[in-house]
């Protein structure tokens, strides 16, 4: 064997020795990404208000009874926890795994939930899921708004059902969401939107949302250096909204890479993610 071939083989072995354990670690652990969102529209009473986003859970398990996940969320000391869809996986729904997590998290902070496309597929199981969430005092938002109050001041928390509940025709879903948001007749106060689908960012901008918390894209599943995610549901290859922060005309959208997986059980360069958002009042 030539010296050049030996060097190539040794280099390949070294890369593999590093890459394989790193990829395994990036699939069996969850990271927490912290964001700060600053706005003069945010009431002073909500200065340093913290929300933890749990998206695309898909029956994931991190430690016995998901204790690893619960510890990480509790460590953020959230004022609220929001679930932005796909708590269950439609291919193998397991309500028991989810209920263990919900039971623990509702003891940490008030919890709010909107549906995802996987819940829309679970026609027969969804009523049981919703009943379980309500039994544990999770606020389920079906195209509606609730007011969060702190020291006499309020902000609006808006929740949209996944559009697949109404119509799976992608060509009409954005206009459908725009209509839903208009019909809510929201006040001019600070608005936070929970919506599973990041691909409809234009609709959220048109509705003048201040902050949008979303998921669905799974970070693009395989993330390439300097490129980003490879493929995402409803966005196809090289998705525009695969994870992170997007800002346009006063609307900020934060897209979680999600906690669990669905069709593809393996991620690459795309560690599962909890999102922690701190709101800051700007003078």
Image (cartoon, rainbow, N blue to C red):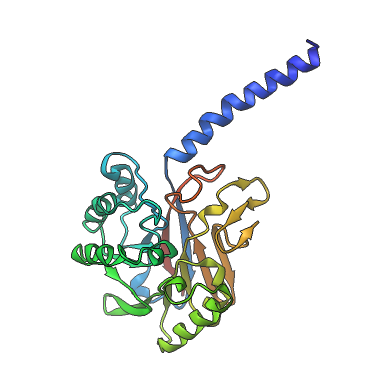
Q: Quadrant of residue 187?
A: bottom left
User: Residue 257, position in %: x, y?
Assistant: 49, 54
2 or 92, which lies in front? Answer: 92
273 or 165, which lies in front? Answer: 165
Q: Residue at x 49, y 60 (%)?
A: 216
Left or right: 120 with respect to 170? Answer: left
User: Residue 96, position in %: x, y?
Assistant: 25, 51
232 or 159, which lies in front? Answer: 232
Residue 101 lies, with reference to residue 268, above or below; the image says: below
Q: Is residue 65 visible?
A: yes
Q: Say which quadrant the N terminus sits in.
A: top right
Left or right: 102 with respect to 116? Answer: left
Q: Residue at x 35, y 67 (%)?
A: 123
User: Residue 79, position in %: x, y?
Assistant: 30, 63
Residue 280 lies, with reference to residue 180, above or below; the image says: above
User: Residue 162, position in %: x, y?
Assistant: 43, 70
Q: Residue furthest top?
A: 1
Left or right: 77 with respect to 23? Answer: left
16 or 187, which lies in front? Answer: 16
């Amino acid at each position: 064997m030539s010296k050049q071939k030996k060097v190539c083989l040794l280099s390949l072995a070294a890369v593999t020795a590093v890459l394989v354990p790193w990829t395994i670690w990036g699939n069996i652990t969850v990271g927490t990404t912290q964001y700060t969102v600053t706005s003069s529209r945010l009431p002073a009473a909500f200065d340093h208000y913290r929300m933890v986003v749990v998206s695309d859970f898909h029956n994931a398990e991190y430690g016995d009874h998901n204790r690893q996940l619960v510890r990480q969320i509790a460590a953020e000391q959230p004022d609220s926890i929001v679930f932005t869809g796909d708590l269950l996986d439609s291919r193998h729904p397991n309500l028991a795994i989810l209920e263990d997590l919900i039971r623990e998290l509702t003891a940490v902070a008030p919890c709010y939930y909107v549906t995802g496309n996987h819940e829309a597929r679970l026609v027969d199981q969804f009523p049981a899921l919703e009943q379980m969430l309500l039994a544990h005092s999770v606020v389920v938002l079906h195209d509606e708004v609730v007011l969060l109050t702190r020291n006499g001041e309020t902000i609006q928390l808006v929740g949209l059902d996944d559009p697949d509940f109404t119509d799976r025709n992608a060509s009409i879903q954005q206009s459908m969401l725009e209509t839903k948001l208009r019909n809510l007749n929201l006040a001019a106060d600070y608005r936070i939107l929970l919506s599973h689908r990041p691909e409809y960012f234009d609709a959220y901008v048109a509705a003048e949302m201040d902050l949008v918390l979303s998921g669905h894209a799974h970070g693009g599943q395989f993330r390439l250096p300097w490129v980003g995610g490879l493929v995402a549901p409803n966005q196809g290859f090289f998705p525009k909204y695969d994870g992170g922060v997007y800002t346009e005309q006063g609307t900020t959208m934060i897209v979680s890479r999600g906690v669990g997986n669905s069709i593809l059980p393996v991620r690459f360069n795309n560690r599962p993610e909890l999102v922690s958002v701190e709101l800051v009042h700007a003078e």
